[in-house]
Image: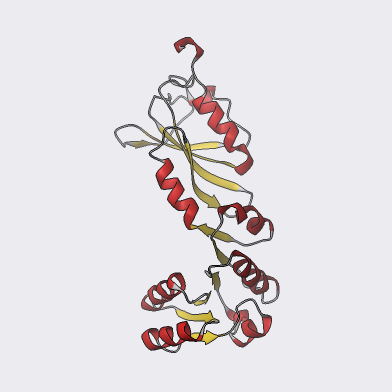
Amino acid sequence: MYIMIVGGGKAGYYLAKQLVEDGHEVLVIEKDAAKCQQIADELGDIVLRGDGCEGVTLEAAGTGRADLFIAVTGDDEDNLVACQVAKNRFSVRRTVALINNPKNEAIFKKLGIDTTISSTALILANIEQELPSHPLIPLLTIKGGGLEMVEVKVPSYSAMVGKRIDELLLPQQCLITLIIDEEGVPRVPTSDTSIRAGDELVAVCRRESEDALRAVLTTPNREME
């Protein structure tokens, strides 16, 4: 597989190093001469000095035959532009962009970037798993259709505790695919599976339906108040 990486900083360097070790053909595009030299000294002739946002540079790099194009610079705008040029001008099938500011994720998706990775969001997701005030955790964005895989922990006070799956008024295009109980035992739910306090539900839903799903599963049982 021919994989192009725009950005020769720490993320780009270690990504290239691992991919080379895995047997892939890799090219790193980096503007900084010192970083280019370091990559060349340590990984060999897999680096091209240039601006990965410019069509001339990408043409010289043979972007048209790339199987995967990854932009991991420290600038969100550069990552977006590089991926757009690769996809729209050189017809690269799959693009991946690092997002430094999670607020930019929506615009990246809207403009056709296939996969986005936000280190900030990943860290927050791990932190939020330990916070009862954040019962819904995004796990994975599913390519196409605006779908996400999320995890929702059912609190003990939820009105849904004791109800069956077929009794839940879930948002449209939302599907519960897995239930993990408090002992960590997974089970595939059926229509008559009952919800228990402390269950972690893995669901697939539309991004805009996440708040509605959270509300369904965490609304307090008024009889307990």
Residue at position x 44%, y 89% in the image:
45
Residue at position x 67%, y 85% in the image:
56
| Total residue callouts | 0
Q: Position of residue 39 (x, y in %)?
A: 42, 83
Asked whether the viewer can see residue 40, the reply is: yes
Nearer to me, 190 or 145: 145
Q: Position of residue 38 (x, y in %)?
A: 41, 84
Nearer to me, 189 or 19: 19
Q: Position of residue 140 (x, y in %)?
A: 50, 50
Asked where in the image residue 116 lies, by quadrant, the reply is bottom right
Nearer to me, 77 or 218: 77
Asked if residue 189 is positioned above or below residue 38 in the image, the reply reads above
Residue at position x 38%, y 39% in the image:
130
Asked where in the image residue 96 lies, by quadrant, the reply is bottom right
Asked if residue 93 is positioned above or below residue 24 in the image, the reply reads above
Asked if residue 161 is positioned above or below residue 56 in the image, the reply reads above
Asked whether the viewer can see residue 46, the reply is: no
Q: Position of residue 102 (x, y in %)?
A: 56, 53
- Asked if residue 55 lies left or right of residue 29, the reply is right
Specify the farthest residue to the left: 183
Asked where in the image residue 49 lies, by quadrant, the reply is bottom right
Residue at position x 39%, y 84% in the image:
43
Nearer to me, 191 or 22: 22
